[in-house]
Amino acid sequence: MSQRKERRGIHVDQSELHCNKGCGYYGNAAWQGLCSKCWREEYQRARQKQIQEDWALAEKLQREEEVAYASIQGAQSQPQAQPQASLAPFSKFEEKKTNEKTRKVTTVKKFFSPSSRTAPKKENQEGKTPSPSISRQSSIETDRVSRDFVDFLKTLHKPGREVHKQSRAFIEIMANKKDLSADELSECVQDFYQNLSDRLMTHFKGSSERVERVMDEVEKYIMTRLYKSVFCPETTDDEEKDLATQNRIRALHWVDIQMLCVPVDEEIPEVSDNVVKAITDVIEMDSKRVPRDKLACITRCSKHIFSAIKITKSEPASADDFLPTLIYIVLKANPPRLQSNIQYITRFCNPSRLMTGEDGYYFTNLCCAVAFIEKLDAQSLNLDPEDFERYMSGQASPRRPEADSGWPQVDPPTGSAASSPALSQVYHNLDLLSGLGSRQDRVLEGVQSLQRDLITWQESVEREVQEILEKYPLEIRLPTPSAIDSDNVENDRLPPPLTPQVFAG
Protein backbone atom coordinates (compact mmCIF):
# COMPACT_ATOMS: atom_id res chain seq x y z
CA MET A 1 0.00 0.00 0.00
CA SER A 2 2.88 2.32 0.69
CA GLN A 3 4.24 1.68 -2.78
CA ARG A 4 0.87 2.54 -4.23
CA LYS A 5 0.90 5.89 -2.48
CA GLU A 6 4.49 6.49 -3.45
CA ARG A 7 3.86 6.12 -7.15
CA ARG A 8 1.21 8.82 -7.06
CA GLY A 9 3.80 11.57 -7.08
CA ILE A 10 1.91 14.43 -8.75
CA HIS A 11 2.25 17.07 -6.09
CA VAL A 12 2.90 20.79 -6.35
CA ASP A 13 3.54 22.89 -3.28
CA GLN A 14 1.36 25.99 -3.21
CA SER A 15 4.45 28.12 -2.68
CA GLU A 16 5.67 27.00 -6.11
CA LEU A 17 2.68 28.69 -7.74
CA HIS A 18 3.69 32.12 -6.41
CA CYS A 19 6.18 34.59 -7.84
CA ASN A 20 9.85 33.73 -7.43
CA LYS A 21 10.46 37.24 -6.13
CA GLY A 22 8.34 36.48 -3.08
CA CYS A 23 5.86 39.29 -3.69
CA GLY A 24 2.90 37.02 -2.94
CA TYR A 25 1.30 37.13 -6.40
CA TYR A 26 0.90 34.14 -8.69
CA GLY A 27 3.79 33.46 -11.04
CA ASN A 28 3.80 32.13 -14.56
CA ALA A 29 6.11 29.79 -16.43
CA ALA A 30 6.04 32.09 -19.46
CA TRP A 31 7.48 34.84 -17.22
CA GLN A 32 10.20 32.59 -15.76
CA GLY A 33 8.21 32.04 -12.58
CA LEU A 34 7.53 35.75 -11.99
CA CYS A 35 4.25 37.57 -11.69
CA SER A 36 3.24 40.15 -14.30
CA LYS A 37 4.37 43.05 -12.12
CA CYS A 38 7.86 41.68 -11.39
CA TRP A 39 8.22 40.51 -14.97
CA ARG A 40 7.48 43.98 -16.33
CA GLU A 41 10.04 45.46 -13.96
CA GLU A 42 12.65 42.96 -15.15
CA TYR A 43 11.68 43.55 -18.76
CA GLN A 44 11.91 47.32 -18.38
CA ARG A 45 15.27 47.00 -16.66
CA ALA A 46 16.62 44.76 -19.42
CA ARG A 47 15.24 47.03 -22.11
CA GLN A 48 16.78 50.13 -20.57
CA LYS A 49 20.09 48.33 -20.36
CA GLN A 50 19.83 47.35 -24.02
CA ILE A 51 18.97 50.93 -24.98
CA GLN A 52 22.00 52.24 -23.10
CA GLU A 53 24.23 49.69 -24.80
CA ASP A 54 22.82 50.66 -28.20
CA TRP A 55 23.44 54.33 -27.53
CA ALA A 56 26.99 53.61 -26.39
CA LEU A 57 27.62 51.57 -29.54
CA ALA A 58 26.11 54.32 -31.70
CA GLU A 59 28.37 56.94 -30.11
CA LYS A 60 31.40 54.68 -30.55
CA LEU A 61 30.61 54.18 -34.22
CA GLN A 62 30.08 57.92 -34.59
CA ARG A 63 33.54 58.62 -33.20
CA GLU A 64 35.09 55.98 -35.43
CA GLU A 65 33.37 57.53 -38.43
CA GLU A 66 34.68 60.97 -37.53
CA VAL A 67 38.22 59.63 -37.18
CA ALA A 68 37.90 57.81 -40.50
CA TYR A 69 36.56 60.95 -42.19
CA ALA A 70 39.45 63.03 -40.79
CA SER A 71 41.98 60.49 -42.04
CA ILE A 72 40.43 60.61 -45.51
CA GLN A 73 40.64 64.39 -45.57
CA GLY A 74 44.32 64.20 -44.54
CA ALA A 75 45.05 61.68 -47.24
CA GLN A 76 43.45 63.86 -49.91
CA SER A 77 45.69 66.84 -48.95
CA GLN A 78 48.85 64.81 -49.79
CA PRO A 79 50.11 64.27 -53.37
CA GLN A 80 47.98 61.69 -55.11
CA ALA A 81 50.85 59.22 -55.44
CA GLN A 82 49.07 56.41 -53.69
CA PRO A 83 47.13 54.03 -55.90
CA GLN A 84 43.34 54.29 -55.82
CA ALA A 85 43.04 50.58 -55.03
CA SER A 86 44.60 51.09 -51.61
CA LEU A 87 41.53 53.06 -50.48
CA ALA A 88 39.14 50.27 -51.43
CA PRO A 89 39.54 48.21 -48.20
CA PHE A 90 39.09 51.33 -46.07
CA SER A 91 35.99 52.33 -48.08
CA LYS A 92 34.44 48.92 -47.40
CA PHE A 93 35.28 49.26 -43.72
CA GLU A 94 33.69 52.71 -43.61
CA GLU A 95 30.54 51.49 -45.38
CA LYS A 96 30.20 48.57 -42.96
CA LYS A 97 30.55 50.81 -39.92
CA THR A 98 28.07 53.33 -41.29
CA ASN A 99 25.45 50.64 -41.97
CA GLU A 100 25.89 49.13 -38.52
CA LYS A 101 25.55 52.54 -36.90
CA THR A 102 22.40 53.31 -38.89
CA ARG A 103 20.84 50.02 -37.85
CA LYS A 104 21.59 50.55 -34.15
CA VAL A 105 20.34 54.13 -34.17
CA THR A 106 17.12 53.02 -35.88
CA THR A 107 16.61 50.38 -33.17
CA VAL A 108 17.08 52.96 -30.44
CA LYS A 109 14.68 55.39 -32.11
CA LYS A 110 12.08 52.64 -32.39
CA PHE A 111 12.26 52.00 -28.64
CA PHE A 112 11.85 55.70 -27.84
CA SER A 113 9.10 56.31 -30.39
CA PRO A 114 5.81 56.54 -28.44
CA SER A 115 3.65 55.91 -31.47
CA SER A 116 3.52 56.26 -35.18
CA ARG A 117 1.34 59.37 -35.11
CA THR A 118 4.32 61.50 -36.10
CA ALA A 119 4.36 59.81 -39.48
CA PRO A 120 2.75 61.55 -42.43
CA LYS A 121 -1.01 61.34 -42.67
CA LYS A 122 -0.84 59.49 -45.95
CA GLU A 123 1.27 56.71 -44.44
CA ASN A 124 -1.12 56.40 -41.48
CA GLN A 125 -4.07 55.89 -43.79
CA GLU A 126 -2.18 53.34 -45.84
CA GLY A 127 -1.31 51.46 -42.67
CA LYS A 128 -4.96 51.21 -41.64
CA THR A 129 -6.23 49.70 -44.84
CA PRO A 130 -4.66 46.21 -44.79
CA SER A 131 -5.70 45.42 -41.22
CA PRO A 132 -8.94 43.39 -41.33
CA SER A 133 -9.60 43.89 -37.60
CA ILE A 134 -9.51 47.70 -37.90
CA SER A 135 -11.35 48.12 -41.18
CA ARG A 136 -14.97 49.13 -41.40
CA GLN A 137 -15.89 45.68 -42.71
CA SER A 138 -15.68 44.14 -39.26
CA SER A 139 -17.41 41.01 -38.13
CA ILE A 140 -20.76 40.87 -36.42
CA GLU A 141 -19.14 40.18 -33.08
CA THR A 142 -16.83 43.17 -33.42
CA ASP A 143 -19.75 45.46 -34.26
CA ARG A 144 -21.74 44.14 -31.31
CA VAL A 145 -18.83 44.66 -28.92
CA SER A 146 -18.30 48.19 -30.24
CA ARG A 147 -21.95 49.08 -29.67
CA ASP A 148 -21.93 47.60 -26.18
CA PHE A 149 -18.75 49.53 -25.38
CA VAL A 150 -20.26 52.82 -26.51
CA ASP A 151 -23.47 52.16 -24.58
CA PHE A 152 -21.45 51.41 -21.45
CA LEU A 153 -19.35 54.56 -21.77
CA LYS A 154 -22.46 56.71 -22.10
CA THR A 155 -23.19 55.98 -18.46
CA LEU A 156 -19.84 57.52 -17.49
CA HIS A 157 -20.55 60.84 -19.26
CA LYS A 158 -17.35 62.92 -19.54
CA PRO A 159 -14.79 60.24 -18.54
CA GLY A 160 -16.56 57.86 -20.91
CA ARG A 161 -15.82 60.14 -23.88
CA GLU A 162 -12.18 60.35 -22.85
CA VAL A 163 -11.89 56.58 -22.49
CA HIS A 164 -13.47 56.06 -25.90
CA LYS A 165 -11.11 58.58 -27.47
CA GLN A 166 -8.04 57.01 -25.89
CA SER A 167 -9.13 53.48 -26.85
CA ARG A 168 -9.74 54.37 -30.50
CA ALA A 169 -6.43 56.21 -30.70
CA PHE A 170 -4.63 53.22 -29.21
CA ILE A 171 -6.20 50.83 -31.73
CA GLU A 172 -5.06 53.08 -34.59
CA ILE A 173 -1.55 53.19 -33.15
CA MET A 174 -1.43 49.41 -32.83
CA ALA A 175 -2.59 49.03 -36.42
CA ASN A 176 0.62 50.76 -37.56
CA LYS A 177 2.95 48.73 -35.33
CA LYS A 178 2.96 45.53 -37.32
CA ASP A 179 6.72 45.08 -37.25
CA LEU A 180 6.89 44.71 -33.47
CA SER A 181 7.51 41.39 -31.78
CA ALA A 182 4.94 39.70 -29.58
CA ASP A 183 6.68 40.89 -26.40
CA GLU A 184 6.73 44.46 -27.67
CA LEU A 185 3.04 44.29 -28.59
CA SER A 186 2.32 42.95 -25.12
CA GLU A 187 4.33 45.76 -23.58
CA CYS A 188 2.33 48.37 -25.53
CA VAL A 189 -0.98 46.89 -24.40
CA GLN A 190 0.12 46.57 -20.78
CA ASP A 191 1.40 50.16 -20.78
CA PHE A 192 -1.97 51.34 -22.09
CA TYR A 193 -3.77 49.36 -19.38
CA GLN A 194 -1.54 50.84 -16.68
CA ASN A 195 -1.81 54.45 -17.87
CA LEU A 196 -5.56 54.31 -18.36
CA SER A 197 -6.05 52.58 -15.00
CA ASP A 198 -4.04 55.29 -13.23
CA ARG A 199 -6.14 58.01 -14.85
CA LEU A 200 -9.39 56.28 -13.93
CA MET A 201 -8.19 55.73 -10.38
CA THR A 202 -7.61 59.46 -10.06
CA HIS A 203 -10.99 60.33 -11.54
CA PHE A 204 -12.97 57.82 -9.45
CA LYS A 205 -11.01 58.79 -6.34
CA GLY A 206 -9.63 55.37 -5.57
CA SER A 207 -12.74 53.28 -6.31
CA SER A 208 -11.01 50.11 -7.51
CA GLU A 209 -14.28 48.31 -8.25
CA ARG A 210 -15.43 50.95 -10.74
CA VAL A 211 -11.97 51.11 -12.30
CA GLU A 212 -11.90 47.33 -12.64
CA ARG A 213 -15.29 47.36 -14.32
CA VAL A 214 -14.23 50.00 -16.83
CA MET A 215 -10.96 48.22 -17.53
CA ASP A 216 -12.84 44.98 -18.22
CA GLU A 217 -14.91 46.74 -20.86
CA VAL A 218 -11.83 48.42 -22.32
CA GLU A 219 -10.03 45.07 -22.55
CA LYS A 220 -13.05 43.49 -24.22
CA TYR A 221 -13.28 46.28 -26.80
CA ILE A 222 -9.58 46.54 -27.58
CA MET A 223 -8.73 42.84 -27.74
CA THR A 224 -11.79 42.04 -29.85
CA ARG A 225 -10.62 44.60 -32.39
CA LEU A 226 -6.96 43.52 -32.25
CA TYR A 227 -7.53 39.77 -31.96
CA LYS A 228 -6.67 38.83 -35.54
CA SER A 229 -3.37 40.69 -35.49
CA VAL A 230 -2.08 39.76 -32.02
CA PHE A 231 -3.30 36.18 -31.50
CA CYS A 232 -0.60 33.71 -32.56
CA PRO A 233 1.41 36.29 -34.55
CA GLU A 234 3.75 35.18 -37.30
CA THR A 235 6.77 36.52 -35.42
CA THR A 236 6.42 33.80 -32.76
CA ASP A 237 6.67 30.02 -32.70
CA ASP A 238 3.28 29.59 -31.00
CA GLU A 239 1.91 27.51 -33.85
CA GLU A 240 4.81 25.06 -33.70
CA LYS A 241 4.32 24.75 -29.94
CA ASP A 242 0.62 24.08 -30.49
CA LEU A 243 1.35 21.21 -32.85
CA ALA A 244 4.01 19.77 -30.54
CA THR A 245 1.67 19.87 -27.54
CA GLN A 246 -1.21 18.39 -29.52
CA ASN A 247 0.96 15.51 -30.76
CA ARG A 248 2.31 14.98 -27.25
CA ILE A 249 -1.19 14.71 -25.76
CA ARG A 250 -2.29 12.44 -28.60
CA ALA A 251 0.64 10.13 -27.88
CA LEU A 252 -0.39 10.00 -24.18
CA HIS A 253 -3.90 8.74 -24.93
CA TRP A 254 -3.20 5.55 -22.97
CA VAL A 255 -2.75 7.36 -19.64
CA ASP A 256 -5.79 6.64 -17.45
CA ILE A 257 -7.23 7.72 -14.13
CA GLN A 258 -5.37 5.09 -12.13
CA MET A 259 -1.95 6.16 -13.41
CA LEU A 260 -2.55 9.77 -12.40
CA CYS A 261 -4.37 8.85 -9.16
CA VAL A 262 -7.33 11.01 -10.07
CA PRO A 263 -9.91 10.93 -7.25
CA VAL A 264 -12.89 10.87 -9.62
CA ASP A 265 -15.44 8.08 -10.11
CA GLU A 266 -17.01 8.51 -13.53
CA GLU A 267 -19.57 5.79 -12.87
CA ILE A 268 -21.46 8.32 -10.77
CA PRO A 269 -23.73 10.23 -13.21
CA GLU A 270 -23.16 13.63 -11.58
CA VAL A 271 -19.41 13.13 -11.65
CA SER A 272 -19.51 12.06 -15.29
CA ASP A 273 -21.55 15.16 -16.18
CA ASN A 274 -19.04 17.44 -14.43
CA VAL A 275 -16.15 15.79 -16.26
CA VAL A 276 -17.88 16.30 -19.61
CA LYS A 277 -18.62 19.95 -18.75
CA ALA A 278 -15.00 20.53 -17.70
CA ILE A 279 -13.77 19.10 -21.01
CA THR A 280 -16.25 21.26 -22.92
CA ASP A 281 -15.18 24.43 -21.10
CA VAL A 282 -11.46 23.97 -21.72
CA ILE A 283 -12.14 23.27 -25.41
CA GLU A 284 -14.45 26.29 -25.65
CA MET A 285 -11.58 28.54 -24.54
CA ASP A 286 -10.25 28.68 -28.10
CA SER A 287 -13.50 30.15 -29.43
CA LYS A 288 -13.26 33.26 -27.23
CA ARG A 289 -11.49 36.46 -28.28
CA VAL A 290 -11.16 38.36 -25.03
CA PRO A 291 -8.51 37.16 -22.55
CA ARG A 292 -10.99 37.60 -19.70
CA ASP A 293 -13.47 35.30 -21.47
CA LYS A 294 -10.77 32.68 -21.99
CA LEU A 295 -9.94 32.90 -18.29
CA ALA A 296 -13.63 32.46 -17.50
CA CYS A 297 -13.62 29.16 -19.43
CA ILE A 298 -10.65 27.96 -17.38
CA THR A 299 -12.39 29.00 -14.16
CA ARG A 300 -15.60 27.15 -15.08
CA CYS A 301 -13.59 24.07 -16.02
CA SER A 302 -11.78 24.14 -12.66
CA LYS A 303 -15.01 24.54 -10.70
CA HIS A 304 -16.51 21.52 -12.45
CA ILE A 305 -13.38 19.58 -11.49
CA PHE A 306 -13.72 20.59 -7.84
CA SER A 307 -17.38 19.61 -7.95
CA ALA A 308 -16.58 16.17 -9.41
CA ILE A 309 -13.94 15.54 -6.74
CA LYS A 310 -16.25 16.68 -3.95
CA ILE A 311 -19.05 14.36 -5.09
CA THR A 312 -16.66 11.42 -5.38
CA LYS A 313 -14.91 11.89 -2.04
CA SER A 314 -17.87 13.38 -0.17
CA GLU A 315 -15.54 16.08 1.12
CA PRO A 316 -13.98 19.31 -0.20
CA ALA A 317 -11.21 18.79 -2.73
CA SER A 318 -7.61 19.71 -1.98
CA ALA A 319 -4.98 21.21 -4.23
CA ASP A 320 -3.24 17.82 -4.47
CA ASP A 321 -6.46 16.35 -5.84
CA PHE A 322 -7.14 19.22 -8.23
CA LEU A 323 -3.89 19.26 -10.24
CA PRO A 324 -3.91 15.53 -11.24
CA THR A 325 -7.56 15.85 -12.24
CA LEU A 326 -6.82 18.95 -14.30
CA ILE A 327 -4.01 17.05 -16.06
CA TYR A 328 -6.44 14.22 -16.78
CA ILE A 329 -9.02 16.65 -18.21
CA VAL A 330 -6.42 18.27 -20.47
CA LEU A 331 -5.29 14.85 -21.71
CA LYS A 332 -8.85 13.82 -22.50
CA ALA A 333 -9.80 17.15 -24.10
CA ASN A 334 -6.60 17.89 -26.06
CA PRO A 335 -7.70 21.54 -26.43
CA PRO A 336 -6.98 23.20 -29.77
CA ARG A 337 -4.18 25.80 -29.88
CA LEU A 338 -3.50 25.37 -26.19
CA GLN A 339 -0.10 27.06 -26.18
CA SER A 340 -1.34 30.00 -28.27
CA ASN A 341 -4.25 30.59 -25.90
CA ILE A 342 -1.98 30.47 -22.85
CA GLN A 343 0.45 32.91 -24.43
CA TYR A 344 -2.40 35.19 -25.53
CA ILE A 345 -3.77 35.36 -22.00
CA THR A 346 -0.30 35.92 -20.60
CA ARG A 347 0.50 38.76 -22.98
CA PHE A 348 -2.74 40.71 -23.19
CA CYS A 349 -4.86 39.99 -20.13
CA ASN A 350 -5.37 42.59 -17.44
CA PRO A 351 -2.41 41.80 -15.15
CA SER A 352 -4.46 42.14 -11.97
CA ARG A 353 -6.48 39.06 -12.95
CA LEU A 354 -3.39 36.89 -13.34
CA MET A 355 -1.72 38.09 -10.15
CA THR A 356 -4.54 37.42 -7.67
CA GLY A 357 -7.95 35.84 -7.37
CA GLU A 358 -9.36 32.51 -8.47
CA ASP A 359 -8.77 33.30 -12.15
CA GLY A 360 -5.05 33.70 -11.53
CA TYR A 361 -4.92 30.56 -9.38
CA TYR A 362 -6.68 28.36 -11.93
CA PHE A 363 -4.65 29.77 -14.82
CA THR A 364 -1.40 29.11 -12.95
CA ASN A 365 -2.48 25.51 -12.33
CA LEU A 366 -3.30 25.09 -16.03
CA CYS A 367 0.22 26.27 -16.91
CA CYS A 368 1.60 23.74 -14.39
CA ALA A 369 -0.53 20.97 -15.94
CA VAL A 370 0.76 21.74 -19.43
CA ALA A 371 4.35 21.83 -18.16
CA PHE A 372 3.83 18.46 -16.45
CA ILE A 373 2.44 16.92 -19.65
CA GLU A 374 5.42 18.16 -21.63
CA LYS A 375 7.85 16.60 -19.14
CA LEU A 376 5.85 13.44 -18.40
CA ASP A 377 8.12 10.40 -18.37
CA ALA A 378 8.22 6.81 -17.13
CA GLN A 379 9.35 7.83 -13.66
CA SER A 380 6.37 10.17 -13.25
CA LEU A 381 3.99 7.24 -13.81
CA ASN A 382 6.18 4.64 -12.05
CA LEU A 383 6.55 2.65 -15.27
CA ASP A 384 9.45 0.80 -16.82
CA PRO A 385 11.20 3.05 -19.38
CA GLU A 386 10.93 0.40 -22.09
CA ASP A 387 7.20 -0.04 -21.48
CA PHE A 388 6.75 3.72 -21.49
CA GLU A 389 8.45 4.02 -24.88
CA ARG A 390 6.34 1.17 -26.27
CA TYR A 391 3.17 2.85 -25.07
CA MET A 392 4.26 6.19 -26.53
CA SER A 393 5.09 4.65 -29.91
CA GLY A 394 1.79 2.75 -30.04
CA GLN A 395 3.42 -0.68 -30.14
CA ALA A 396 1.54 -1.74 -27.01
CA SER A 397 -1.03 -0.47 -24.56
CA PRO A 398 -1.40 -1.12 -20.84
CA ARG A 399 -5.07 -1.86 -21.43
CA ARG A 400 -4.49 -4.21 -24.39
CA PRO A 401 -1.80 -6.86 -23.73
CA GLU A 402 -0.97 -8.77 -26.88
CA ALA A 403 -1.32 -12.57 -27.12
CA ASP A 404 0.26 -15.07 -29.45
CA SER A 405 -2.90 -15.36 -31.51
CA GLY A 406 -2.59 -11.76 -32.63
CA TRP A 407 -5.95 -10.85 -31.11
CA PRO A 408 -6.45 -8.96 -27.85
CA GLN A 409 -7.03 -11.30 -24.93
CA VAL A 410 -8.43 -9.54 -21.86
CA ASP A 411 -10.08 -10.59 -18.66
CA PRO A 412 -13.37 -9.09 -17.56
CA PRO A 413 -12.86 -5.73 -15.82
CA THR A 414 -12.90 -5.95 -12.07
CA GLY A 415 -12.13 -3.58 -9.24
CA SER A 416 -10.56 -0.30 -10.28
CA ALA A 417 -10.46 -1.34 -13.92
CA ALA A 418 -14.22 -1.03 -14.05
CA SER A 419 -14.38 2.36 -12.34
CA SER A 420 -15.03 4.22 -15.57
CA PRO A 421 -18.00 3.64 -17.90
CA ALA A 422 -15.74 4.41 -20.85
CA LEU A 423 -13.24 1.73 -19.77
CA SER A 424 -16.04 -0.76 -19.18
CA GLN A 425 -17.29 -0.12 -22.69
CA VAL A 426 -13.76 -0.55 -24.05
CA TYR A 427 -13.35 -3.90 -22.31
CA HIS A 428 -16.76 -5.01 -23.52
CA ASN A 429 -15.82 -4.13 -27.08
CA LEU A 430 -12.54 -5.98 -26.70
CA ASP A 431 -14.42 -9.08 -25.51
CA LEU A 432 -16.56 -8.90 -28.62
CA LEU A 433 -13.50 -8.36 -30.75
CA SER A 434 -11.71 -11.39 -29.30
CA GLY A 435 -14.33 -13.75 -30.83
CA LEU A 436 -14.12 -12.31 -34.30
CA GLY A 437 -11.03 -14.36 -35.16
CA SER A 438 -12.68 -17.77 -34.76
CA ARG A 439 -15.87 -16.51 -36.35
CA GLN A 440 -13.94 -15.28 -39.33
CA ASP A 441 -12.16 -18.63 -39.64
CA ARG A 442 -15.50 -20.47 -39.64
CA VAL A 443 -16.88 -18.13 -42.28
CA LEU A 444 -13.82 -18.66 -44.48
CA GLU A 445 -14.14 -22.46 -44.13
CA GLY A 446 -17.81 -22.28 -45.11
CA VAL A 447 -16.98 -20.14 -48.14
CA GLN A 448 -14.31 -22.58 -49.29
CA SER A 449 -16.66 -25.56 -48.80
CA LEU A 450 -19.39 -23.82 -50.80
CA GLN A 451 -16.91 -23.07 -53.57
CA ARG A 452 -15.89 -26.74 -53.74
CA ASP A 453 -19.56 -27.85 -53.83
CA LEU A 454 -20.31 -25.47 -56.69
CA ILE A 455 -17.39 -26.80 -58.73
CA THR A 456 -18.45 -30.44 -58.09
CA TRP A 457 -22.09 -29.72 -59.02
CA GLN A 458 -21.03 -28.01 -62.26
CA GLU A 459 -18.87 -30.98 -63.24
CA SER A 460 -21.65 -33.51 -62.48
CA VAL A 461 -24.19 -31.59 -64.57
CA GLU A 462 -21.80 -31.40 -67.53
CA ARG A 463 -21.12 -35.14 -67.24
CA GLU A 464 -24.85 -36.10 -67.22
CA VAL A 465 -25.59 -33.87 -70.22
CA GLN A 466 -22.77 -35.48 -72.15
CA GLU A 467 -24.03 -38.99 -71.35
CA ILE A 468 -27.56 -38.16 -72.55
CA LEU A 469 -26.23 -36.70 -75.79
CA GLU A 470 -24.22 -39.84 -76.45
CA LYS A 471 -27.17 -42.15 -75.70
CA TYR A 472 -29.76 -40.21 -77.70
CA PRO A 473 -27.97 -38.53 -80.57
CA LEU A 474 -29.83 -35.72 -82.24
CA GLU A 475 -31.06 -36.48 -85.82
CA ILE A 476 -32.22 -33.67 -88.05
CA ARG A 477 -34.53 -34.70 -90.98
CA LEU A 478 -34.95 -32.23 -93.82
CA PRO A 479 -38.53 -32.06 -95.33
CA THR A 480 -39.05 -33.05 -99.08
CA PRO A 481 -40.48 -30.34 -101.36
CA SER A 482 -44.02 -30.99 -102.74
CA ALA A 483 -46.83 -29.13 -104.56
CA ILE A 484 -49.35 -27.25 -102.61
CA ASP A 485 -52.30 -29.48 -103.66
CA SER A 486 -50.42 -32.77 -103.96
CA ASP A 487 -52.08 -34.25 -100.91
CA ASN A 488 -55.59 -33.26 -101.98
CA VAL A 489 -57.46 -36.41 -103.25
CA GLU A 490 -60.36 -34.48 -104.75
CA ASN A 491 -58.40 -32.54 -107.31
CA ASP A 492 -60.55 -33.84 -110.17
CA ARG A 493 -63.61 -32.22 -108.74
CA LEU A 494 -62.05 -28.80 -108.67
CA PRO A 495 -63.23 -26.30 -111.35
CA PRO A 496 -60.75 -25.36 -114.01
CA PRO A 497 -58.68 -22.32 -113.33
CA LEU A 498 -59.81 -19.01 -114.63
CA THR A 499 -58.30 -17.78 -117.81
CA PRO A 500 -57.85 -14.07 -118.44
CA GLN A 501 -60.14 -12.52 -121.00
CA VAL A 502 -59.36 -9.56 -123.19
CA PHE A 503 -62.12 -7.08 -123.97
CA ALA A 504 -61.83 -4.87 -127.05
CA GLY A 505 -62.21 -1.25 -126.20
Image (cartoon, grey):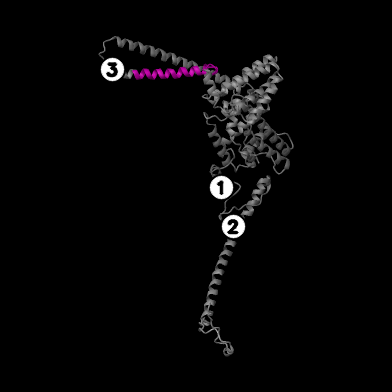
Does label 3 or label 1 sit earlier along the sequence?
3
**Which sits in the foreground, 413 or 40?**
40
SS category of the residue bearing label 3? helix
Segment tinted magenta in the rendering: 91-119
- Point out residue 449 in the picture as x, y percentages from the top left corner: 57, 67
Magenta-colored stretch includes residue 111 = yes
| Measured Cα–Cα span from mark 1 to mark 2 | 20 Å
The residue identified by callout 3 is 84
181 relative to 491, above or below:
above
The residue mark sitting in front, 3 or 2, is 3
The residue identified by callout 2 is 437
443 relative to 312, above or below:
below
Specify the quadrant of the image occupied by residue 316.
top right
Three-letter amino acid code of the residue under disc 2: Gly
401 relative to 128, above or below:
below
Q: Residues within 10 Å of mark 3 (few under 14, many from 20)?
A: few
The residue mark sitting in front, 3 or 1, is 3
- Point out residue 94 in the picture as x, y percentages from the top left corner: 37, 17
Q: Which mark is residue 396?
A: 1
